[in-house]
Image (cartoon, rainbow, N blue to C red):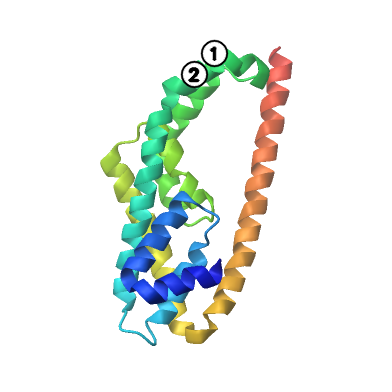
Amino acid sequence: MENWITDIMEQFGYIGILLMIALENVFPPIPSEVILTFGGFMTTYTNLTVPGVIIAATIGSVVGAVILYGIGRLLDVERLEKIVDRWGHILRVKKEDIRKADAWFDKYGYWTVLFCRMIPLIRSLISIPAGMSNMKFGMFLLFTTIGTLIWNIILVSVGAAVGDSWGNIVAFMDVYSNIAYAVIAVAVIAFLFFFFRKRRKSA
């Protein structure tokens, strides 16, 4: 996959970077670390510039985020409640749980979107609950753009600075990603454990 990504970027330049990052947002297994650091490296031997790569990557990220936000809007809380009405007794989930989660996201959603843009995997998926909670689209775009811009500036600049050693940065980011995935997995398991234990007690 890495060779495929870099081939497209070298062939299509800014457009290739934009498309790869947009696709990465919709299909998280594509590693943004490879795209951004290699994009930075490309500025050392092509006509591409660091600001140009950052802008192209940011536009691509926002486009991908908007697509997932739209999917979230289609799902919305009301549809989830209908699913809970039908299957909630099996999942041990109530409408109140959905409403509480929605209220939490209404309160902290903007900052969640901002900081999650710098966490692998979650940086893409966070757009779906943002859409489901009907987050104001303008604010979603603002916080998405800020968080994405920070992430892009860091990785593109590092890629440009280390040059043909950009692969070492990708290896380092793989470690960061694995740690992030482990933390996410532990958090999900802990949440499910306490959630179902609470359900059993209330039952």
Res. 156 visible in picture: no
Residue 48 is labelled as none
Q: Residue at x 44, y 34 (%)?
A: 105
Q: Are marks 2 and 1 in contact (CB under 8 Å)?
A: yes
Three-letter amino acid code of the residue under disc 2: Glu
SS category of the residue bearing label 2: helix
Which x, y percent locates residue 89? 64, 14
Is 135 situated left or right of 117 in this image?
Answer: left
Which x, y percent locates residue 62? 34, 53
In this view, 115 is above or below 97: below
Crowding around mark 1 (Cα neighbors within 10 Å: few <14, some 14 to 19, many 20+) is few
SS category of the residue bearing label 1: helix
Quarter occupied by the C terminus? top right
Quarter occupied by the N terminus? bottom right
Residue beneath disc 2: 81
Three-letter amino acid code of the residue under disc 1: Asp
Is 152 situated left or right of 86 in this image?
Answer: left
Crowding around mark 2 (Cα neighbors within 10 Å: few <14, some 14 to 19, many 20+) is some
Residue 85 is labelled as 1
Is 12 in front, or is 32? Answer: 12
Which x, y percent locates residue 70? 36, 38
Q: CA distance from mark 2 to mark 1?
A: 6 Å
Is 80 in front, or is 180? Answer: 80
Q: Residue at x 41, y 43 (%)?
A: 68
- Which residue is at the far left? 138
Q: How many marks?
A: 2
In this view, 99 is above or below 106: above
